Image (cartoon, grey):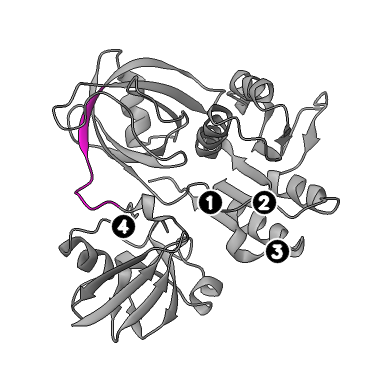
């Protein structure tokens, strides 16, 4: 049995014991400590933390979840790591992202379903009243939920786009995948469908202890957690400088422009750069990726920002590279990657 001490971003220490035969994620849950995770198979990177000291065995995993450079720097995936000595770990999330009860499972009704550009759908779900959790949608801006179809056959993870609320509403953006299982369900989904919601979960949340400007980099439906965090800032009347770099491949894929315009009204200091990678000839905005727009902005930045990036692994990697080249410390770049299931 080995001792594991995990230091959160806001300075809390979480301690548990780990057997050599179990993963660190399983060991924590045996102690009723539920750390941020998602796929539990080494494919998503949601449970990535840093290792300060100690020996581990890291099992097979996807390089998109944990790159060779991240592994060389000492990072591990809790779901694919076994302890081989006492461990000191450090987490890129606050203590608030840790639960000491099992992840909630609740029912929600599909109340809105509409296209979001040419390649995605916008879903609005309404929680049913729950004897344990009431009707409110309580989560930390930036987190995700797992959504299971009415027949129980398909479960996928999607980031929340709205801010926490007492009304019990959950707003999701789902990228449509050719022959995708959840996309196929959406083609026949009907208002009034009841879905199972597991969560909230996830560590991709704002660092409230930092006073740095906040810059958000989003690709496609990776915009959802940025919307959630910016909406939370608007509700708190946060005055710190903030920017949003939002990109898609083609103009017809753009969505949520009304929501972004509303945020610009609520957050007058918000600067927005809409990016299209392969635009038509009449496109008047930025041509290129959000990472390229970020690199250009960093070159003239008066103060280095915290960077929050969500999107495909290639965008996350390019953003991390641009941020580092622009002088942003690696631990001030917070990321969440998504890949088709």
Q: Nearer the viewer, residue 9 or 22?
A: 9
Decide: marks 4, 2 in contact (CB < 8 A)?
no
Q: Which residue appears at 36% of the width and 86% of the height?
A: 55
Q: Which one is in front, 45 or 212? A: 212
Q: Nearer the viewer, residue 148 or 178?
A: 148
Mark 3 and mark 4 lie on one chain; the one further toward the N terminus is 4
Residue 156 visible within the image: yes
Which residue does the numbered mark 3 point to in the structure image? 324
Crowding around mark 4 (Cα neighbors within 10 Å: few <14, some 14 to 19, many 20+) is: many
Report how far apart the C-alphas of labels 2 and 3 lie in the structure: 16 Å
Give the residue at mark 2.
Answer: 212
Q: Quadrant of residue 256?
A: top right
* Residue bearing the label numbered 4: 35
**105 in the magenta segment:** yes
Question: Circle 1 is placed at which residue position?
Answer: 207
Vertical comparison of 104 with 54: above or below: above
Give coordinates of residue 271: x percent, y percent: 74, 34
Mark 1 falls on what kind of element? loop
**What residue sits 40% from the left and 23% below the top?**
123
Q: Which-is-in-front pick, marks 3 and 4?
A: 4
């Amino acid at each position: 049995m080995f001792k594991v001490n995990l230091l959160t971003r806001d300075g809390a220490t979480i301690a548990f014991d780990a057997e050599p035969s179990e993963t660190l994620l399983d060991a924590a849950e045996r102690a009723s400590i539920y750390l941020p995770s998602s796929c539990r198979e080494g494919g998503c990177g949601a449970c990535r933390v840093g290792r300060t000291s100690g020996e581990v065995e890291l099992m097979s995993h996807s390089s998109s979840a944990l790159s060779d450079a991240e592994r060389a720097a000492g990072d591990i995936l809790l779901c694919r790591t076994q302890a081989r000595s006492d461990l000191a770990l450090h987490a890129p999330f606050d203590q608030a992202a840790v639960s000491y009860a099992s992840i909630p499972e609740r029912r929600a009704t599909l109340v809105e379903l509409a296209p979001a550009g040419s390649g995605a759908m916008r879903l609005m779900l309404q929680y049913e009243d729950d004897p344990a959790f009431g009707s409110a949608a309580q989560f930390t801006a930036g987190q995700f939920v797992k959504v299971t179809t009415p027949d129980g056959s398909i479960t996928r993870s999607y980031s929340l786009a709205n801010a926490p609320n007492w009304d019990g509403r959950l707003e999701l953006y789902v990228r449509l995948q050719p022959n995708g299982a959840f996309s196929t369900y959406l083609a026949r989904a009907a208002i009034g469908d009841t879905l199972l919601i597991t969560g909230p979960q996830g560590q991709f949340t704002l660092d409230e202890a930092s006073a740095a400007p906040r810059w958000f980099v989003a690709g496609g439906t990776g915009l959802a957690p940025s919307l959630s965090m910016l909406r939370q800032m608007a509700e708190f009347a946060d005055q710190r400088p903030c920017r949003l770099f939002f990109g898609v491949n083609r103009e017809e894929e753009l969505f949520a422009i009304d929501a972004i315009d509303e945020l610009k009204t609520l957050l007058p200091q918000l600067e927005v750069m809409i990016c299209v990678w392969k635009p038509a000839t009449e496109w008047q905005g930025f041509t290129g990726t959000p990472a390229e727009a970020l690199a250009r902005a960093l070159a003239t930045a008066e103060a280095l920002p915290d960077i929050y990036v969500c999107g495909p692994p290639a965008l996350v990697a390019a953003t991390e590279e641009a941020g580092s080249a622009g002088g942003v410390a690696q631990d001030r770049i917070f990321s969440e990657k998504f890949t088709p299931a």
